[in-house]
Amino acid sequence: EDQVTQSPEALRLQEGESSSLNCSYTVSGLRGLFWYRQDPGKGPEFLFTLYSAGEEKEKERLKATLTKKESFLHITAPKPEDSATYLCAVLRESGGGADGLTFGKGTHLIIQP
Amino acid sequence: DTGVSQDPRHKITKRGQNVTFRCDPISEHNRLYWYRQTLGQGPEFLTYFQNEAQLEKSRLLSDRFSAERPKGSFSTLEIQRTEQGDSAMYLCASSLGSRGLDGYTFGSGTRLTVV
């Protein structure tokens, strides 16, 4: 069964204090690993898809990296508007398995001014 | 296009009643997904459609749950004989890619409370 574990569960940073969020995963054949941002009362907002180990993607203050067992979301010089829950999810290669994403529980990030 | 729309945003129902939610995906998207999210958890996959065909159902989708997507456009999710454990946010998402890698667009969800 696919598993996604995110750490830490919650993280409080000062504005400008860079850090990383971790996503460890177990999946039988990775089709893609996804990062989403979720604000309270809203649906997840797509950030990145990573396909293979060694891949990196960047968007503004966010950078996602992927290894064979985990992914990191690096946040550089965060601002209060980066406060949200960050979700990691995996999609398994087909072959009779579910075609849906398996999500972790998320990391609740708070950036204090 | 205003994105993925879900209706209603909130629903309070008594245990044992039936409820139906609607999702309008982005018009050109051929794939539509339903997920359920409880407090402090990530979304859990329920089912997905490619056009009008329902291709996959999670074991989480009990016999009390049914989903349809007539004509490959909007979709409905019905829960019969609701139970308190059905209380959750029900999220709909859509995508265009054939392999699901383009990143889904989620709606804002329908929050169901069963009392």
Image (cartoon, coloured by chain):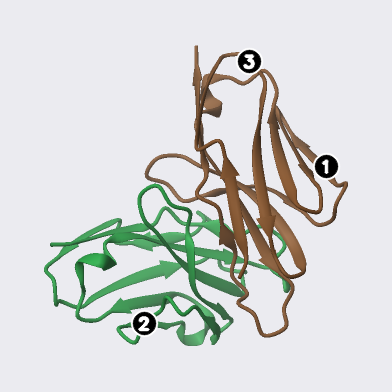
Chain colours: A brown, B green
Q: Is residue A82 left or right of residue B86?
A: right
Is B32 situated above or below B8?
Answer: below
Q: Position of residue B64 (x, y in %)?
A: 30, 83
Label 2 element class: loop
The image quadrant where one finds the N terminus of chain A is bottom right
Q: Is residue B47 left or right of residue B77?
A: right
The chain holding disc 2 is: B
Q: Residue at x 36, y 76 (%)?
A: B77
In the rendered structure, which disc, 3 or 1, sits on the residue that comes first in sequence? 3
Residue to which mark 3 is pinned: A17
Q: Is residue A107 left or right of residue A62?
A: left
Q: Residue at x 35, y 50 (%)?
A: B39
Q: Which numbered marker is on residue A56?
A: 1
Is B107 situated above or below B56?
Answer: above
Of residues B27 and A109, which is closer to you in this image?
A109
Q: Position of residue A60 (x, y in %)?
A: 71, 29
| Mark 2 Cα-neighbour bin, 10 Å: few <14, some 14–19, many ≥20 | few
Q: Say which quarter of the image contains residue A29.
A: bottom right
Residue to which mark 2 is pinned: B62
Q: Is residue A6 left or right of residue A63?
A: left
Of residues A93 and A58, which is closer to you in this image?
A93
Q: Residue at x 26, y 66 (%)?
A: B85
Q: Are marks 3 and 1 in contact (CB under 8 Å)?
A: no
| Mark 3 Cα-neighbour bin, 10 Å: few <14, some 14–19, many ≥20 | some
Q: Residue at x 76, y 66 (%)?
A: A31
How far is disc 2 from disc 1 in space, using C-alphas?
Answer: 39 Å
